[in-house]
Amino acid sequence: MKILLFGIAKDIIGTSSLLLKEAEKNPKTVGELKKLISNKYPKFKTLSSIAIAVNSCYAEDKTKLQSSDEIAIIPPVSGG
């Protein structure tokens, strides 16, 4: 499972992508993925709202995940 990170999420985790290996317990839903990342990177919990895209489509916490999915974590952005 490949996870792409953008903005402050990338800064918190320290890389622009993560690859969950088959040996790890892959999360079954987007909600489980958020918990897994928050447990491994506690500062991730400070993000007030994030968007998650699964295979280029925005997803909700209940969206099911497959090991072959490409996931993007998109934190809130501001502009001017």
Image (cartoon, rainbow, N blue to C red):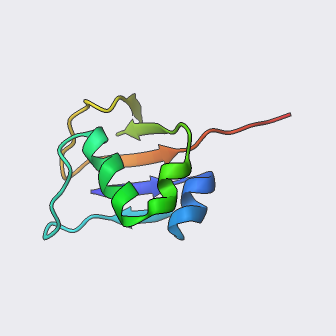
Q: Is residue 11 left or right of residue 3?
A: right
x and y percent of residue 14 in the render?
54, 70
x and y percent of residue 28 in the render?
17, 44
Numbered-mark total: 0
Q: Is residue 73 left or right of residue 23?
A: right
Q: Quadrant of residue 80?
A: top right
Q: Is residue 18 left or right of residue 64?
A: right
Q: Quadrant of residue 48?
A: top right
x and y percent of residue 25 in the render?
15, 61
x and y percent of residue 77 in the render?
68, 39
Front residue (pair 36, 51): 36
Q: Is residue 7 above or below residue 76?
A: below
Quarter of the image with the N terminus in it = bottom left
Q: Is residue 58 above or below residue 22?
A: above
Q: Quadrant of residue 79?
A: top right
- Which residue is painted at 35% across and 29% down in the image? 60
Front residue (pair 55, 73): 73
Q: Is residue 46 above or below residue 15?
A: above
User: Of all residues shown, which one is farthest toward the right?
Assistant: 80
Q: Is residue 61 left or right of residue 29?
A: right
- Which residue is painted at 45% across and 61% down in the image? 42
- Which residue is painted at 35% across and 39% down in the image? 54
Q: Is residue 8 above or below residue 24?
A: above
